[in-house]
Image (tube, rainbow, N blue to C red):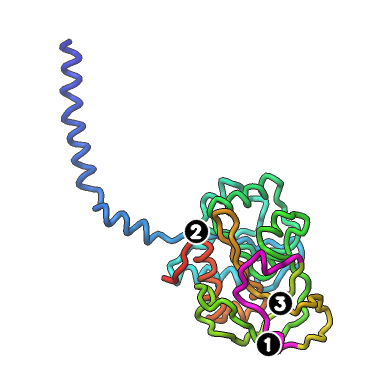
Amino acid sequence: MTGSTGLTRNRTPALVFFVGVVTLTLPPLSDQQTALRAAPHQVLYLTQSAGFAHAVLGHSEAVLGRIGADSGAFDVTVSHDASTVTADMLDRYDAVVFYTTGELPMRDDQKAALLAYVRGGGGFVGVHSATDTFYDWPGYLALIGGYFDGHPWRQEVTVRVEDQTHPSTRHLGASFRIDDEIYQFRQWSRAAVDVLLSLDVGSVDLAASGIKRSDRDFALAWTRREGDGRVFYTALGHRPGVWDDARFQRHLLEGIRWAMGHDDPS
């Protein structure tokens, strides 16, 4: 009994002292909450090319990292290897951005993990040739909303802003001019996506070689929902000059922020 009582006496002062230290060193709860809110989100930027490799990729990595840091919206981790993408890896990111081509080296379980990540609330963003990716995986087509089907025009065009209220487009006005490589899509339908930008066909030659869409409907950016997740795609971004354009940078920045669940710019 004496030994037991002595042990109890020795523990009590130590416990009181420890609690006192914690109370003195922890910041106020409001400061902790502020720090958590201020912590940047994490974005994985995958730029692997299993098909055509765009010369702009290295430049795009630098630009995306800079606009994420300058805005304070997110930090960017660049990867050139889709084979490293796993469920555990995806859990570390708030959004995944693809600027990719071809059949990327991902196993079936990795593909399932990507879909589960988005359906569980993760953001997915595709830039330019992300639609020129995974032709042998129907789940990816459903995720991104359409497949690349050629680029009839490489010139300055007029782009119509169909949704002037979306965070990624409301700075663009009703239309704007830009010099880029202009995609068309197959297995794409307005019924499956919400169109943000489209080509003003009055600004191009509709007799140009390679045109396949008889409906003259050339969407250039859209969004869709996948479970609890958000998908944002923009077909712009082929040329370095586009990546250096402040309008495109804000378009992409706010598209990523929207995909992460933020509807309004900071």
Instruction: Kindly identify which residue carries mark 2.
Output: 42
Judging depth in this view, the residue of 213 and 1 nearest the camera is 213
Q: Which residues are magenta?
A: 187-204
The type of residue carrying mark 3 is: Phe
Image point (60%, 56%), residue name: 226
Q: Position of residue 106 (x, y in %)?
A: 70, 50
Dot 3: what SS? Answer: loop
**Image quadrant where residue 79 sits:** bottom right
Mark 3 — residue? 218
Between disc 1 and disc 2, the foreground one is: 1
142 vs 161, left or right, is: right
Q: Tell whether 259 sits left or right of 21.
A: right
Q: Name the residue that disc number 1 marks.
A: 156
Which image quadrant for residue 214?
Answer: bottom right
Q: Give residue 245's position: percent from left, percent from top.
A: 56, 81
Q: Amino acid at mark 2?
A: Gln
- Secondary structure of the residue carrying tag 2 is strand
Mark 2 or 3 closer to N-term?
Answer: 2
Q: Helix or strand or loop: what does disc 1 sit on? A: strand
Position in image of residue 238 (x %, y %): 67, 76
Q: Earlier in the sequence, mark 1 or mark 3?
A: 1
The amino acid sitting under disc 1 is Glu
Separation of marks 2 and 3 at Cα, in angstroms: 32 Å
Q: CA distance from mark 1 to mark 3?
A: 15 Å
Compared with 106, 98 (above or below) is below
